[in-house]
């Protein structure tokens, strides 16, 4: 039977990781895979996570099943983290949350919910968007289309083109938005732009689906959630898929949540039964460990304080690297303008060089990034920024 199956093409990111590992040059720089790194180039376990994990393990007396919707305490703590304490829609009991296997799991459960409600649904994603959005969303059977977003001339959002694109959508169309730290461009919406999109969404009857994978890594924990908080307060229906992979450093623990806002509490109850059904048809129940850790951190004042500081350190390091990269690039390649890198947020930016230049950076200079020239800023270090900038200067000259 399986002889009928053809081999799939290699995953470009995994290929890039393997090539980096195999490169013996000591100057090599890994700007490929999207994980946070500290000054030593490591992705360490956060202090708050270590402590919470010890407390969780010490208390744990059973490994019996939890529930298809996951850890109820985690779900409640995530509602508070994402929407803020005392959010009117949470208070009105119009939010239902299901723990999911990472942000990816949350995105997929949300897509399945959309398809169940509306089999011909079309989700509109930004141009460009995170490559995994495509298989995660279309894998459920819903269709995907694109709206304009990134402006390579400015390194910002082409907001008028975005609004024009959204204005043309049919009532009921789903619009996927990145809450902050847009992946892959780093170009984020301002608070005013979120307000403008809200007005358009209300006027046109669109349904927002927000992906928040970097809360706290852009401008702040509350600041990065401006869009989800505003939309949840003002709209009858919103989906928010959240990942704890980056801001809690829990990548392999597969920890995330899907929040669904409904117009009424009875509607919200019905949605929760659908979410549970979907979980049961895919993975039955989410893994518990990461969610138990996040729950412990968010409900213990000392751990929460330490986690907030650690997220602040990650955010500050990224911002500092952005400024330093711009300064070094300006020195090494004064004819080019890379100042947009410092105006963007989160781990990613497009360097804006072509495929051949990306290859040259990799083969001649041992600087690794994806073919679209997306760089993970957190992959830079104080002692290799100048090397990176010189390498870029040599390929763009
Ligand atoms: C935009 C975006 N959404 C969602 C995710 C989900 O990540 P995970 O499934 O590892 O939690 C990521 C991770 O890279 C991401 O960049």
Image (cartoon, rainbow, N blue to C red):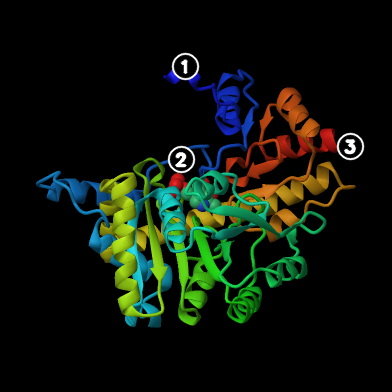
Whole-angstrom CA distance, mark 3 to mark 2, is 34 Å
Neighbor class of circle 2 (other Cα within 10 Å; few <14, some 14-19, many 20+) is some
Front residue of 40 and 98 = 98
Whole-angstrom CA distance, mark 2 to mark 1, is 40 Å
Residue farthest to the left, as pictured: 61
Front residue of 12 and 50 = 12
Mark 3 / mark 1, whichever is N-terminal = 1
Q: Is mark 2 within 8 Å of ligand 1?
A: no
Q: Nearer the viewer, mark 3 or mark 1?
A: 1
What residue is shown with label 2?
Answer: 43
Say whether residue 102 is left or right of residue 290: right
What residue is shown with label 3?
Answer: 397
Taking the spot 65% from the left edge, 55% from the top edge, the residue there is 145
What residue is shown with label 1?
Answer: 3
Taking the spot 67% from the left edge, 52% from the top edge, the residue there is 185
Residue 270 in view (yes/no): yes
> Label 1 near label 2: C-beta < 8 Å?
no
Q: Is mark 3 within 8 Å of ligand 1?
A: no
> Label 2 near label 3: C-beta < 8 Å?
no
Residue 353 drawn at (x, y percent): 79, 41
Label 1, secondary structure: give it.
helix
Whole-angstrom CA distance, mark 3 to mark 1, is 50 Å
Front residue of 148 and 293 = 148
Q: Quadrant of the N terminus?
A: top left
**Quarter of image, res 298:** bottom left
Mark 2 / mark 1, whichever is N-terminal = 1
Mark 3 / mark 2, whichever is N-terminal = 2
Label 3, secondary structure: give it.
loop
Neighbor class of circle 3 (other Cα within 10 Å; few <14, some 14-19, many 20+) is few
Neighbor class of circle 1 (other Cα within 10 Å; few <14, some 14-19, many 20+) is few
């Amino acid at each position: 039977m399986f002889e009928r199956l053809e081999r799939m093409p290699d995953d470009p990111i995994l290929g890039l990781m393997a090539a980096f590992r195999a490169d013996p040059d000591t100057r090599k720089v890994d700007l490929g895979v999207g994980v946070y790194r500290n000054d030593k180039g490591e992705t360490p376990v956060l202090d708050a996570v270590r402590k919470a994990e010890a407390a969780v393990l010490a208390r744990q007396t059973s490994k019996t099943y939890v529930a298809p919707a996951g850890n109820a305490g985690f779900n409640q703590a995530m509602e508070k983290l994402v929407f803020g304490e005392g959010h009117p829609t949470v208070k009105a009991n119009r939010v239902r949350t299901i723990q999911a296997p990472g942000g990816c799991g949350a995105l997929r459960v949300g897509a399945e919910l959309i398809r169940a409600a509306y089999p011909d649904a079309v989700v509109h994603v930004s141009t460009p968007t995170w490559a995994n959005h495509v298989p995660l969303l279309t894998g459920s059977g819903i269709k995907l289309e694109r709206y304009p977003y990134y402006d390579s001339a400015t390194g910002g959002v082409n907001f008028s083109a975005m609004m024009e694109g959204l204005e043309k959508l049919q009532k009921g169309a789903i619009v996927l938005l990145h809450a902050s730290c847009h992946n892959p461009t780093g170009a984020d919406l301002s608070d005013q732009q979120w307000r403008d999109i809200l007005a358009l969404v209300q006027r046109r009857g669109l349904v927002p689906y927000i992906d928040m994978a970097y809360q706290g890594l852009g401008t702040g924990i509350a600041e990065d959630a401006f869009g989800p908080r505003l939309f949840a307060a003002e709209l009858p229906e919103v989906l928010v898929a959240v990942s704890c992979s980056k801001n809690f450093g829990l990548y392999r623990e597969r920890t995330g949540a899907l929040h669904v806002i409904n117009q009424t509490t009875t509607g919200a109850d019905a949605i929760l039964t659908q979410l549970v059904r979907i979980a049961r048809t895919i993975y039955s129940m989410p893994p518990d460990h990461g969610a138990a850790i996040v729950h412990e951190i968010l409900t213990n004042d000392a751990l929460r304080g330490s986690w907030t500081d650690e997220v602040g350190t990650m955010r500050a390091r990224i911002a500092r690297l952005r400024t330093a990269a711009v300064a070094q690039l300006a020195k090494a390649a004064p004819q080019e303008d890379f100042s947009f890198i410092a105006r963007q947020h989160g781990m990613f930016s497009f360097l804006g060089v072509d495929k051949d230049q990306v290859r040259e950076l990799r083969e001649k200079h041992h600087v690794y990034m994806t073919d679209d020239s997306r760089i993970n800023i957190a992959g830079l270090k104080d002692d290799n920024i100048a090397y990176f900038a010189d390498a870029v200067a040599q390929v763009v000259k």
